Amino acid sequence: MRHPVRALIISALVVGLAATGCDKNTGTTGTGNEPEKAQSDIVVDYKGETPTPAAPVEGATPGGKLTIMQEGDFEHLSPQQIYVSNALAYANLFHRQLTGYIEDAKGGPLKLVGDLATNAGETTDEGKTWKYTLRDGVKFEDGTPITSKDVAYGIAIAFSTYGVQGPQYLQAALDPQGTYKGPFDSKGAEIPGVTTPDDKTIVFTFDRPHAELPYLVSYPTATPIQESKFTKEKYETAFQSTGPYKIKEYKRDAYLDLEKNTNWDPKSDPIRNQYVDTVHFEFTVDGESETNRIIASQGDDAAAIMTGNVVPQKIAEVKADPEIMKRTLSAATPFVRYLYINTQRVTDVSVRQALNYAFDRDAYIKAIGGYDIAEPASTTLAPVVPGYKKFDEYPGAGGGTNGDVAKAQELIKGKTVPKLKFCFGNTPVNQTVMAVVQTGLARAGFTFSSAPIDPAAFYTTVGDKTTDCDLIAGGWAQDFPDGDATLGVLFDGTKIVDKGNNNLGYFNDPAITAKIGELRTLADRSAAAAQYGDLDQQIMKAAPVIPLRYDRFFSMHGTKVGGTFASPLWAQFNITGIYVKS
């Protein structure tokens, strides 16, 4: 899962579909040690035993306006295009899928449950066929009942150009050959593997078992769309809500105002509550302003949350004030930040290895705010991913974290090293910290041209196979609890496409791709997990990325915000039961 570009340097991110890896919300900060492995359990409700409505939040009061501060607009809100974690977190306000998650404020197990569907899915043939039955009372915001055909149409959209930026797992599973192109380019064709025998039932059929399907249909890929209401590009700012809130007014790059969706039935929803009257997203707030306004907690800001982390220069001030720390949440996340090295352009493995040796992890961690919000990374897998193996292919001189300039220089001695184009999301904080990264790499003799990119277009730009970026700042978290959800996404050469790439190193090593494919087919996922750590180390020998850090969540809310906690899925504030204190 992608990292929000506006949080590129200082924000701590998400685990997508993760069963693992988040602290309880202790209000404490990092220790400088390896990230914790706290929440490691998940409960999947195949029997449909989860009650509705969603459990009430103790002490919650209805009414009021919640403000959500964010440094820039969402890249996508048209559901099948959503794949960045902040959009996935806040889309819970207005998009629903076949399945979804209930998170425990006390750090208990995650629950994967039926959302629009009555349960997490039914299979009688070990995952080759799955059946979902829609709940009674599920409707679009205009009052139209949601049918299985609406879910199928949303999935069809995911195959089209209007789903190219979203996750591709379900599409690849249903149509491994990639012949179906959606309802526009494959007009009249049936969606491979999807049938709707009646208005309440949708069936998925695969050529091999897919035990992971209940996880995949928790993504907005499985958000229903009325065919008559789909307006293509315009749907980004005029989507039909299926959740507790709907659009009141949306001014791109300025604000998004939501109001209650009166056609959302709480008796149909086991996940969400609807306490606040309105939600106001403010897209013109930089990270420092977010931090300062939440610290002050005045006026509307008292009922506000921030989507980024506390900015580095304010961490000491926040930690020194016990009252502010009461509304500050700190949690480990399974998100890993990288500099992807475009292997189509930087073809010499020695040059890529030298970049890894030259990188100064200690200076980088200090530049982003210290060990309260991050830990130095040396692997592509986060420590909470099944199969993680602790290793460091590019240790600093003397075993430290300051890099090994002499080793880097030795690797590139006598070589013609090109000037590298360094691409990152254009925010003030990113510009500052990326300069620190460049300074560290320059110690070994590397030179750069900086290419800041508009955050709203970042992944679209660098995900184009023809990109001329040499180094690309990005990050990832597992989309479900399995090594394939990281290595199979970021380093499988068969998944490189013309646009919408997640393999931003454009890495295509035949031996590694074959091993990824082999592990993917193993039915015993515990046996597969044991091999992913070794594969991670093999990948790092080829150096398609520079691992930067393992992220932590360190963020604040205003004094009048209640019913929220650090989401173990998204490392944002959980908003399913949030309320404004009266």
Image: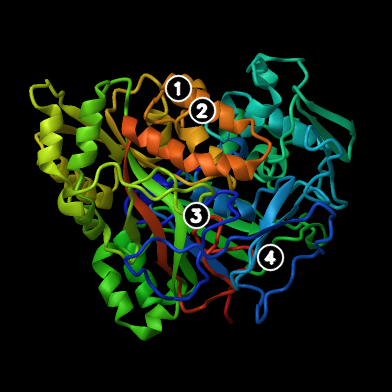
Residue drawn at x 45%, y 62% is 332
Sequence-first disc among 2 and 4:
4
As measured in the structure, the alpha-carbon distance from the residue carrying label 2 to the one carrying label 3 is 22 Å
Q: Quadrant of the C terminus?
A: bottom right
Q: Residue furthest bottom?
A: 322
Question: What residue type is disc 1 on?
Answer: Ala
Q: Which mark is residue 274?
A: 4
- Position of 537 relative to 560 (above/below): above
Residue beneath disc 1:
511
As measured in the structure, the alpha-carbon distance from the residue carrying label 1 to the one carrying label 2 is 6 Å
Residue beneath disc 3:
384
* SS of the residue under disc 1: helix
As measured in the structure, the alpha-carbon distance from the residue carrying label 3 to the one carrying label 4 is 33 Å
As measured in the structure, the alpha-carbon distance from the residue carrying label 2 to the one carrying label 4 is 47 Å
Q: Position of residue 136 (x, y in %)?
A: 88, 51
Residue beneath disc 2:
515
Question: What residue type is disc 3 on?
Answer: Val
